[in-house]
Image (spheres, grey):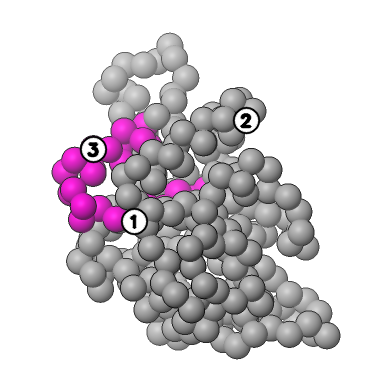
C-alpha cells in the first residue's frame, strides 16, 4: 500500500514496504525529507483507515502544518502530530524540574500508550528528526546506544517507522554511524547540480525484504499531493 502513496513510487519499489521496519530518511537541508515522509504517511492512513503518529522536534505543529499546506499535502484526521510542547507540558504536570527530560523515554511511552488505545490500527510512526533528538538528549554517545533498544521497541510494536536524519550536501557516500547498521532501510533524498540546475532526487540505498531500484530518480515538487517521482536521474 505504501507504493500507492506517491505518484511514481512504483518506479522504485518492485515490492511493497511492510512492517515492522525502521527506515532512515536522510539527506541535506532542502531535500524535502519532512515533506516526503508526511506525504506518504498522510496518504497511507487516509486510504487504509489506519492510525499514525508524527513527532516533530524541529518545529511547532502549526508551523509544520502550514509548510505542508503550502505544498498541497493534506492533513489526515487519522494522524496525530506531536511536538516539543507536548513534552514540556508532561514535564510540568510531572513536576520534574530537577531532572533532565528523558525525551526518548517520553516518545516511547507515548507510542505504547497509543498502541494500547488504538491496537493494531496504529501502524505508522515518524520522528523528525534524529539530530534534534540527540541535541535534546545531550549525551550523543549514550543516546546512540539507546537507539538500538528504541528501534527494537518500534519493531516489537509492529510499526512502520520513518526517522529523519540530516546528511551533508554531497555526502552520499558518507557513513551514517551506528544508525545505518541498526535500521532496516535507508532512503536518500538528495540535490543534484550536475546539469546547471538544482534537481531533487530520491535513491533507495538499503531496504530489507523489498525489491527495489538503486538508481537515483528525480523528484518533482508541486502538483497532486505535493511530491511525485519521475524517471531515473542519469549522471553525465
Residue 145 image point, x, y percent? 57, 30
Residue drawn at (29%, 55%) of the image: 123
Is residue 108 on the magenta stretch?
yes
Q: Are dots 3 and 2 in contact, CB under 8 Å?
A: no
Establish if 155 lies above or below 76. above
Residue extending farthest to the top is: 98
Residue 153 image point, x, y percent? 38, 38
Q: Residues within 10 Å of mark 3 (few under 14, many from 20)?
A: few
Q: Quadrant of residue 236?
A: bottom right
- Identify the residue under disc 2: 140
Where are the magenta residues, as a range? Answer: 106-129
Q: Residues within 10 Å of mark 2 (few under 14, many from 20)?
A: some
| Label whose residue precedes the other's in the sequence (1 or 3) | 3
Q: Is residue 133 left or right of residue 98?
A: right
Residue drawn at (52%, 36%) of the image: 147
Q: Is 174 or 81 nearer to us in this picture?
A: 174
Residue drawn at (66%, 76%) of the image: 216
Q: CA distance from mark 3 to mark 2?
A: 26 Å
Residue 120 image point, x, y percent? 21, 52
Q: Are dots 2 and 1 in contact, CB under 8 Å?
A: no
Which of the numbered marks, if any, corresponds to residue 113? 3
Q: Main secondary structure of the magenta part?
A: helix
Is residue 46 on the magenta stretch?
no
Residue 94 image point, x, y percent? 29, 20
Q: Are dots 1 and 3 in contact, CB under 8 Å?
A: no
| Label whose residue precedes the other's in the sequence (3 or 2) | 3
Amino acid at each position: 500500500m505504501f507504493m500507492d502513496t506517491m505518484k511514481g513510487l512504483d518506479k522504485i519499489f518492485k515490492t511493497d514496504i511492510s512492517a515492522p521496519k525502521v527506515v532512515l530518511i536522510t539527506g541535506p537541508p532542502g531535500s524535502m525529507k519532512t515533506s516526503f515522509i508526511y506525504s506518504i504517511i498522510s496518504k497511507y492512513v487516509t486510504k487504509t483507515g489506519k492510525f499514525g503518529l508524527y513527532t516533530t522536534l524541529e518545529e511547532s505543529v502549526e508551523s509544520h502544518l502550514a509548510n505542508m499546506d503550502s505544498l498541497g499535502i493534506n492533513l489526515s484526521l487519522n494522524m496525530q502530530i506531536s511536538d516539543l510542547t507536548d513534552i514540556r507540558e508532561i514535564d510540568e504536570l510531572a513536576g520534574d524540574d530537577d531532572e533532565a527530560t528523558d525525551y526518548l523515554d517520553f516518545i516511547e511511552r507515548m507510542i505504547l500508550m497509543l498502541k494500547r488505545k488504538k491496537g493494531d490500527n496504529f501502524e505508522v510512526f515518524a520522528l523528525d528528526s534524529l539530530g534534534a533528538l540527540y541535541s535534546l538528549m545531550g549525551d550523543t554517545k549514550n543516546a546512540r546506544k539507546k537507539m538500538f533498544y528504541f528501534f527494537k521497541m518500534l519493531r516489537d510494536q509492529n510499526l512502520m517507522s520513518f526517522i529523519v536524519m540530516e546528511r551533508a550536501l554531497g555526502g552520499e557516500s558518507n557513513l551514517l554511524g551506528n544508525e545505518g547498521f541498526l535500521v532496516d532501510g535507508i532512503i536518500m533524498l538528495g540535490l543534484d547540480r550536475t546539469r546547471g540546475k538544482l534537481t531533487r532526487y530520491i535513491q533507495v540505498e538499503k531496504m530489507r525484504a523489498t525489491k527495489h531500484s538503486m538508481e537515483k530518480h528525480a523528484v518533482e515538487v508541486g502538483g497532486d499531493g505535493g511530491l511525485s517521482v519521475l524517471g531515473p536521474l542519469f549522471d553525465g
